[in-house]
Image (cartoon, rainbow, N blue to C red):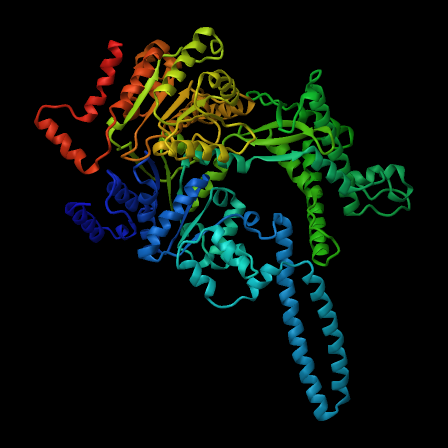
Amino acid sequence: MNFGDKNRVKRMEQKNGYMRYFTKKSCYPNQGEAMEKIHSALLNQKIVLFEGACGTGKTLSSLAPALHVGRKLNKVVIIVTNVHQQMVQFIHEARDINRDNSIKTIVFKGKTSMCPDNLDYEECRLKGENTYDLLDFEREVSSKEKELKDAYEKYKRTKDPALYALRNELEKELEEARKKAQGLRSHSCSKLYEVLRFEGNEFSSWLFSDVRSPEEIMEYAEDRGMCGYELLKKELKNTELLICNFHHVLNADIFMTLLKWLERDPEDIILIFDEAHNIEASARSHSSVMLSELTIEKALSEVGEIPEPDSSPVFGTRTGVSGTGSGSGPGIPLDQDYASRLYAKRLFSCLLNAVRETYDSKLKFGERNRLGKHWQDIQISDPYERLDILKARFLRDAKKEGFADEEKVLTRLREIGEFGGRLEDIYAENYKKGLLPVPKRSQIRYVADFLSSYLVLSDRQNYYPILNMRRDFKSDRVVGRLELFTCIPKNVTQPLLDSVYSAVLMSATLRPFEMIKSTLGITREVEEIIYGITFPKERRLTLAVSVPPLFAKNRDSPETLESLKESLLAATAASPGNVIIYFQSYAEALRYTKLLEPELSVPVFLDEIGVSAQEIRQKFFKKGEQGGKAVLITYLWGTLSEGVDFRDSRGRTVIVVGVGYPALNDRIKAVESAYDTVFGCGEGWEFAVQVPTIRKVRQAMGRVVRSPGDFGVRILLDARYQGSQARKLGKFSVFGYFPPEESKEFLDVAPRDVGSLVEEFFANIVPYSPEKKDHGNKENEKKGLKSPASGRLEFGSLAEKL
């Protein structure tokens, strides 16, 4: 860092208070400007849309001004991500900030992942309630012991018979309280008990003296026989910076609980989303709901054997159950719970039959035996017309059972849900008393609530009903699952973004901003910030190869296969280090693995579906870091296309084969149809398919060249990426969907030239010298020489000659 840089940073510190949280020696290009814009926007309660390429310092650019505004206005900063690697980066950034600023920071994970006893959420909750009750009883026991002692001392002095009787009564009450406490102790959480009894500031001082990872918290708690999650909960009200996952804010119930622990309101929160292009998909998964055939069976089992009123002399008549009276005859009156059980039995049986009849009618010969453990979708409603055959079957059968119409069914379901709620209260009380070995939830309530939502929402454009099926290997039979899939999750994101004080949505692939605002329901004033890649141009090469467009109809043609194979082998051979190849699907990745592996002399790693990619990724990294070379074959919609850092020798060449559109299944079509309805005809394809696909491609391209000194090649194998083919391909071209500053670097080449261009690029790479870079360019300009950047552009003329 030279003297000028030091003075510039010092001036910024004096002018802008947020620079005290900036931990680097100097700013990246545009970083100072970005912080100034974000700082001003947060003070004015705007939503910031921030697209910054790798190397623009997005995290620190957002955190520094947010922390300054948070301290100034007494707000809590919450930064969230859905990528583990980013969570680790946040912790490192926060530790650097904390060294000079003492920011009280908490890294928060879910209850289940931090539970030392590996309990599920419901059992953990009920054991917690028992633990609080246990402490109350122990306080009661302590109070009665003191009262008994006082009574005994007084009796010894006065010999008053009334005090003797009081002492005997107190002894009985004390014994009863001790028994209750003992019963609660066997169904309480000993680690929470220790947390609740723990007093003093020892944990708080340790916690906020640094930025502690969840693993450090759990180790600290385990050494003391405590629960780390509960320790953190007690300290949330003191935090200034909270690092957590998307689901902590996108799930409305969890977010409201979090606010309660923070002792804050939504307007006290400055919210930062990292990888914000994933918000829509995450919110969609949070707002979609499902009901399994097995759950319906459990609900019917919970209902139990219920005699029909017209088949038993003690229960009046069927007319009485239907709500027109209490029945004729001397039988027992039909109370509320009996009626609710009977309604539940009839309606749930209708639903179960509708589910089974539907998938039985859809299964073709032999398909039942081919089903595996993974859920497969079955269409029950046209994605465009929304005519739900399963719902029609259910309502038809319900009418036969005496429920006149959908409105009557919904009325009865509300009553059944309330009955299920009462059952849950009884189950919870019985578990706390030790009468149940494990906590139990009411399946009756869950099925009634789901069925109510399904009937109301399944015909609406924003929701799409789907039937899934798979083989249940435990019972060795086919089972179905009904799903209400959310198409546009604005019902989750809009209330959240409307309620917080301000927010920053950042990503390397956030554009187009108008689409983000529409799909997330952003109605507030917005600050838009865009900064492209600032690394030296001469240290990267982007090739768009004229492989025939990989449409489904010509993907298997010999000409296409040969062009692809030639390009892939040539690029791999010419690359001096690791190569990552992205296909549009796992099936294509598997196919080309078999095709390429016999031709390659280097290790080939396949990212397989259903297998953790972490082990393969680490082996691949290790190969490159040790100076070797390997090929990683994966697919765009897998877990390795974003959030993974293939820096330096971990990855030198990345290849994207085809445009990578997702499988156009019923879900995608339903989303497309919903967007068409809400935003206008033709917008559905753009919003649901085109833009998300290009984001995936841009994310994959960004896996290599991760720092100014890094270098690498990005290859796009499909003519649809070529600017020279845009007019010829018309609507099929995707060249115009890339930001102009990115697409202008695309070099259009033929498959036969890929190897020589890649080889020449790597041959011309020189060691990175940041101090000499600018000076060298200026000297070259004075001498009339081309800069390294302009030298890279010579590849264009070379391609033309070739």
Q: Could you say where residue 40 lies in the image, as x and y percent from the top left?
A: 28, 46
Front-lying residue, 506 or 389: 506
Q: Is residue 42 left or right of residue 201?
A: left
Q: Residue at x 64, y 31 (%)?
A: 482
- Residue 153 or residue 437, whichever sits in front: 437
Quarter of the figure with residue 752: top left
Count all numbered tags in the image, as a single digit.
Answer: 0
Q: Residue 406 location in percent, x, y?
A: 68, 32
Question: Which image quarter: residue 349?
Answer: top right
Image location (x, y in percent) of residue 80: 43, 44
| Foreground pick, 307 / 15 | 15
Q: Is 724 positioned to the left or the right of 639 in the image?
A: left
Confirm whether residue 466 shows in the render.
Answer: yes
Instruction: Please state, as top left, top right, bottom left or bottom right, where the N terminus lies in the image.
Output: top left
Q: Is residue 722 visible?
A: no
Residue at far left of view? 782
In the rendered view, tell whether residue 209 sits above or below residue 36: below
On screen, 594 above or below 294? above
What percent of the width, then of the height, locates residue 407?
67, 34
* Left or right of 53 in this view: 335: right
**What residue is shown at x 43% (from left), y 40% (from top)?**
85
- Depth check: 175 or 529 in front? 175
**Residue closest to the far bottom:** 158
Q: Quadrant of the C terminus?
A: top left
- Is residue 547 shown above or below 479? above
Q: At x 85% / y 40%, what residue is drawn?
A: 307
Q: Is residue 98 above or below residue 325?
A: below
